[in-house]
Amino acid sequence: MNASVENWMQVKPQGLYCAPADCFIDPHDAVDRAVITHGHADHARAGHGAVFATPETIDIMRTRYQEASVAGGVPLPYGTRQDLGKGVTLWLAPAGHILGSAQAVLEYDSKRVVISGDFKRHPDPTCPPFEVVPCDVFVTEATFALPVFKHPPLEDEIAKLMRSLTTLPDRTHMVGVYALGKCQRVMLALRAAGYEYPFYIHGALKKLTELYESYGFDFGDWIPVSEISVKDRDMLRGKIVLCPPSALADRWSRRMPDPLLTMASGWMQIRARARQRRAEMALIVSDHADWDDLIETAVATGAPDVWITHGRVEALEYALRARGINAKALNLIGRDEEAD
């Protein structure tokens, strides 16, 4: 075990802590100094003092929590080195998860620790691809760390949705997507597949979609469903309506003409999860690494030690140890293991 690193990287009640820099990484409580890997709510919380993150992540936090929540934001483009004091250097590398997502690279005492945050290796047009950073300790998630999880190409799942639109033209295709990342990735994939109609979206998806557009992403026409009067909603038949997963189960979706409930998530590989979401059609669309990518990535970093933050830690710990890597679970609390 890398004892020298454990002297300065510690697990505290608030989360992973770099002692010499007096700084937390993705803390789940407000702290004076925080490194934020990406904008999802279980990693980027409001109320910190100084916030070190990519410019995109700081903008996402402003959008979600208002300006005052990140008044101390220190924007760090990928690769920019930041002196955190007491000999600690921080820089950020792409994580391939969502817009602005980053791996936090901490260097101290001739050692390098990489905290990957949430990450994926599959292509995503909304963010730069994941970069392998050689290190002494690699800190990884384990959301989909079971051999059953092998995420198919996004194009295959989008093709499934396009076929359904052709086969069932009288039904409103309601697609449950998370507001940050999944929504915009699915929109771009549908455009690439030739979907040419406007998207109709739930109001909860509007602000973050506009933020992505401010970074140059072109989703084509999209219209808030609230702008379509009830008497005119029959025109939604054969069209795609994007909404938060929670909206699939409430009265909002039942107000659409003959809704076909569809859920886009990595969890859709498990039928029971699809039934929980009341999904008639399941699209396996994940923004996390699958089983093979988790293992291959940990090996590729060359790290002799791998720390696992949350998820299916036991399986990944066993698999990495079988490959001669010192793997251990950190069991950090406060991570959302269901969202994907």
Image (cartoon, grey):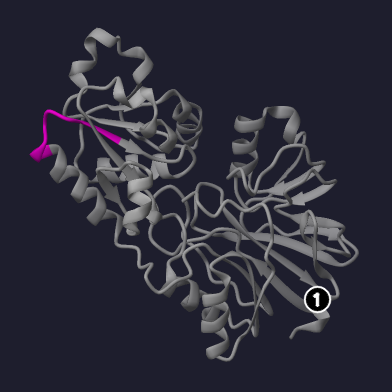
Q: Residue at x 48, y 55 (%)?
A: 128
Counting from the top left corner in percent of width and height, residue 233 is at: 24, 16
Q: Residue at x 34, y 34 (%)?
A: 219
**Is 21 positioned to the left or the right of 139 in the image?**
right
Counting from the top left corner in percent of width and height, residue 309 is at: 64, 65
Q: Residue at x 53, y 68 (%)?
A: 312
Provide the residue span drawn in magenta: 166-174
Which one is in front, 86 or 24?
24
Against 61, residue 254 (above or below) is above
Counting from the top left corner in percent of width and height, residue 339 is at: 49, 49
Against 201, residue 339 (above or below) is below
Corner quadrant of residue 57? top right
**Is 99 positioned to the left or the right of 166 in the image?**
right
According to the picture, the residue beneath numbered tag 1 turns out to be 6
Q: Are there few (<14), some (14-19), or many (20+) residues within 10 Å of tag 1?
A: few
Counting from the top left corner in percent of width and height, residue 222 is at: 33, 26
**Is 295 positioned to the left or the right of 272 in the image?**
right
Corner quadrant of residue 108? bottom right
Corner quadrant of residue 308? bottom right
Q: Amino acid at mark 1?
A: Glu
Q: Residue at x 87, y 57 (%)?
A: 22
